[in-house]
Image (cartoon, rainbow, N blue to C red):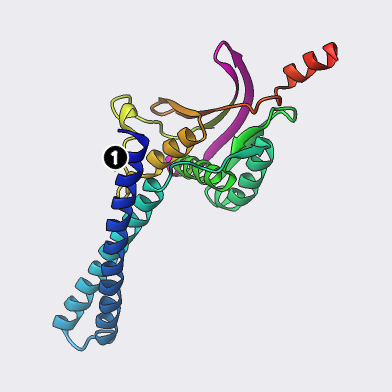
Amino acid sequence: MSHDSYAALAELAGGFIHEIKNHLGTLGLNLQLLAEDFEEPRDQRERRALTRVHKLQSECQRLTDIANDFLRFARIRDLPLAPAELGKVIEEMIDFFTPTARAANIDIKVYVPADLPSVALDIEMFKQALLNLMLNAEQAMPEGGSLTMQAVLEISGQGTYVALSLIDTGKGIDFKVLPKIFEPFFSTKLGGTGLGLATTKKIIEAHRGSIEVQSDVGKGTKFTIRLPACAGSDPLQRVEQGKTA
């Protein structure tokens, strides 16, 4: 599919979902009013009616959540990228996530060299991708554990990259499921929309990067993001330039 065709399809899907959200809003409002009418049920019949209204409200909210997730997924296309310090972005995300990790008995370890080259980011969208992975790790460790974030510089024939790994000590992912985890709407979680990891992958690819996963059941999971270093920001390249100046 060409870029223009994809953009047109995404715009059409976005408009369709937005229209559905409008109707869900009307439905949710009427369910709220109906619940208020049965707020003090007088008999068994009204108690059953109130229970059914609450179930409908729950389903309505779930559909709204799916619609919001899909809109975020569909609208990820050309991101405004600018050079940024990955270490600073990670530090901000750790500060944001620490209360959640502490409540879940998760120990966060960070190993990020100070001299990493800058990478081109849409900072807010990249933070969303990181948050999706951090929440995924939290859900994989219901009894607590550790989450390690480690960044390294990789230089190869293809270029210079910064590789960021998120490693958890959770329950792991079955090898039969592993190839499907980035597919839209695929989820093994009860109530999951199946768009979290798909959105993460799309965000990373919009940064001209890649994401891969390794996992062992009962031991944990490792997600690795690779982002191209900004031109001229490679520390080894700067050293060589200094020698020839």
- Quadrant in the rendering for residue 59: bottom left
- Image check: 176 left or right of 43? right
Depth check, front residue: 185 or 19 = 19
State whether residue 62 appears in this view.
no
- Image check: 219 left or right of 22? right
Q: Residue at x 40, y 31 (%)?
A: 172
Amino acid at circle 1: Phe
Q: Main secondary structure of the magenta part?
A: strand
Q: Is residue 85 magenta?
A: no
Query: Which residue is the extreme one toward the left?
Result: 45
Q: Is residue 36 above or below residue 56?
A: below
Depth check, front residue: 43 or 155 = 155
Q: Residue at x 25, y 72 (%)?
A: 27
Image quadrant containing the C terminus: top right
State whether residue 61 appears in this view.
yes
- Quadrant in the rendering for residue 199: top left
Depth check, front residue: 26 or 63 = 26
- Image check: 212 left or right of 64? right
Residue 135 in percent (x, y) is at: 48, 45
Image quadrant containing the N terminus: top left
- Image check: 36 left or right of 168? left
Residue 182 in percent (x, y) is at: 36, 34
Q: Is residue 62 above or below residue 7?
A: below
- Quadrant in the rendering for residue 52: bottom left
Quick one: SS at disc 1?
loop
Which residues are the magenta region?
139-161
Q: Which residue is mark 1?
A: 186
Residue 159 in percent (x, y) is at: 58, 17
Q: Is residue 152 magenta?
A: yes
